Image (spheres, rainbow, N blue to C red):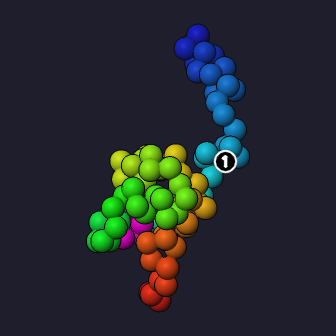
Amino acid sequence: MSTARHTHSADLSDPPRSSPDLDVRDLEKRSRLMRIVTRLIAVSDLGCREIARRAGLPAQKVSDLLSGRLEHLSVEELQLLHRTIDPQPTAH
């Protein structure tokens, strides 16, 4: 019984679901952009450092992206990388 009370009090300290890190739509959008951008980087003639330079981002951001560290990039940064690699995207 004490375990149930302990678990209940732990629930009160959990972060609120409205936290920006837990926004499902934002995560879905970043995940989708991550897949697109990593594929574009893979087939690009440009190196990762050159892509980062052209996008005006630190090379570490591209490295984080390729390592799957999605939480280190914002939607805006992913969109910037997408536009840098594929300035005229094709219609899907």
Q: Give the residue at mark 1.
A: 20
* 68 displayed left or right of 8: left
Quadrant containing the C terminus is bottom left
Q: Residue furthest top?
A: 2
Which one is in front, 87 or 67?
87
Q: Is residue 23 magenta?
A: no
- Residue 45 sits above or below residue 60 on the image: below
Of residues 33 and 81, the one drawn nearer to the viewer in this rendering: 81
Give the extent of the magenta segment. Answer: 36-40
**Position of 89 relative to 44 (above/below):** below
Q: Which residue sits at x=64%, y=30%?
A: 14
Residue 86 drawn at (x, y percent):
45, 77
The answer to which of 64 and 12 lies nearer the viewer is 64
Q: Position of residue 15 (x, y in %)?
A: 66, 34
Q: Tag 1: Cα neighbours inside 10 Å, few (<14), some, or many (≥20)? A: few
Q: Residue at x 36, y 70 (%)?
A: 40
* Rendered-image quadrant of the N terminus: top right
> Can residue 65 be seen by looking at this rendering?
no
Q: In front: 68, or 25? A: 68
| Magenta stretch, main secondary structure class | helix
Query: Element type at marker 1?
Result: helix
Q: How many marks?
A: 1
The answer to whether 49 is drawn above or below residue 42 in the figure is above
